[in-house]
Amino acid sequence: MSFKRMSAGVCCAGCLALVASALAVEVTVKNDSYVEGGSVYIVGNFVAGEQAGARLTSPCDGNIVAVQIAWLEGTPGHQPSVEDAIFIYDGSTFPTPGSELLRLDAPVLTPGYFNEFRYQDQSQTIPISIPVSAGQQFYVTLKFANPTDVGNGGPSVCRDIDGCQSGKNVLYAIPGGWMDFCVYLNGDLLIRAVIDCAEAPEACCLPDGSCDTLTPSDCTAAGGTPQGAGSDCATANCVAPTQACCFEATGGCLDLTEADCLSVGGIPGGLGTECATYVCFPSGACCLPDGTCQDGLSPDDCTALGGVFQGDGTTCAGTSCPEPQGACCFPNGGCLVLTEADCGIAGGTWAGGGSDCADNDANGTADACEGPPSCAGDADLDGDVDLNDLALLLASYGTASGATWGQGDFDQDGDVDLSDLSLMLANYGGACP
């Protein structure tokens, strides 16, 4: 059979109305690249009984709920055509389709439109609903009941102008049977399907400017912007946001992307920052754990000292640091963490700022309230200094802060080091009073 082609623009007013009214979870699946206002070629001449179709791939788990066929005439004025049938076939093999999934008899095709079919019957009471899974291939084909007379301006199916993709267009020819339509075509047929996806993955522009393929809800949860049904990262225009970029040498700031900032040795301020409101190198008062205050510290330096940064530009002269808290020891063995003043009011003995009521040796009395044993080296408090005490010290040797008597901190400076070992060795082998 021979094919004559003529260039024409498809009237898409009906097509756009159909697409615009579709539900947000519906995705139009296509091979063609046609967009409104573009050009296509009419494909002919078919004889009765032949089929032309597209092999499509589902982007999601869902249901095929409609098929769309562009039907174009070369000379205006043709009446709608009643063709033999529209088929949906299993598409696991090529070019011969697999099993028939659905047959729509006597479809009426109006020239100048993407004709959409959503029902299995003429009375439109049984909706199309064919389950498909993500990545599943299927065919949508049109079987002609009438020969198409393209040479005299008659209507027929049409294709785009961007080249034919192998494995995506089929022809059932008489004679010849099923074959790859790309043998004859230089474009993809404008035959499409509509799939109702529970949540179809699509391109998602993330806050850092990167792109990922996510469902709209997952995209929104990640702080991203969904790019629309059927979009992909290959064509999505995700723009990397700018942020405050600080320059330590000058103290200055420019709004740059993170990549550009790092490439010139700047310090990114983080997503959502901008130089107009961002302080690059904050410095201010720092309230220390002992209740004192120190001026001119950065937030990081203040934190390293265990303090609380009071804000950029603050000074100790205008800052009231809270009184330090520590263990308050009571005669009955009880312990509360209080300020020194409150401890005095309660009749307790204050153990110092930063101390707590932890009972690490599990003897029923807070460690801060016990006071040091009379015998340095007696880590296990059994009345002598022996190998067991040495083992406890060695197990904690090198601890830099927060060490207890039971770990070998015999000079009670918070660490276990050579000084503690020397104190132990001085009493090693002896009994404690």
Image: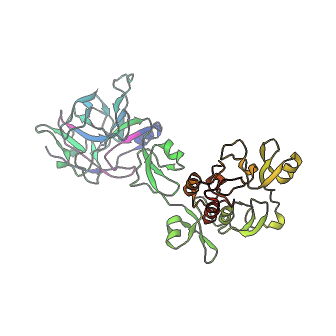
Q: Position of residue 158 (x, y in %)?
A: 28, 45
Q: Is residue 40 above or below residue 107?
A: below
Q: Residue at x 53, y 73 (%)?
A: 265
Q: Residue at x 79, y 63 (%)?
A: 292
Residue 94 shows up from this direction: yes
Q: Is residue 37 within the magenta segment?
A: yes
Q: What stretch is highlighted in magenta?
A: 27-51
Q: Where is residue 388 in the image (x, y as percent from the top left)?
A: 57, 51
Looking at this rendering, what residue extends furthest in the bottom direction?
Answer: 249
Q: Is residue 201 within the magenta segment?
A: no
Dominant SS of magenta comes to loop
Based on the displayed image, in which of its 4 quarters is residue 320 positioned? bottom right
Q: Which residue is drawn at 28% across and 53% down?
A: 161
Q: Where is residue 163 in the image (x, y as percent from the top left)?
A: 26, 53
Residue 74 shows up from this direction: no
Looking at this rendering, what residue extends furthest in the left direction?
Answer: 175
Judging depth in this view, the residue of 290 and 244 nearest the camera is: 290
Based on the displayed image, in which of its 4 quarters is residue 58 positioned? top left
Judging depth in this view, the residue of 174 and 428 nearest the camera is: 428
Q: Is residue 301 above or below residue 195?
A: below
Q: Where is residue 412 in the image (x, y as percent from the top left)?
A: 69, 59
305 relative position to 110: left or right: right
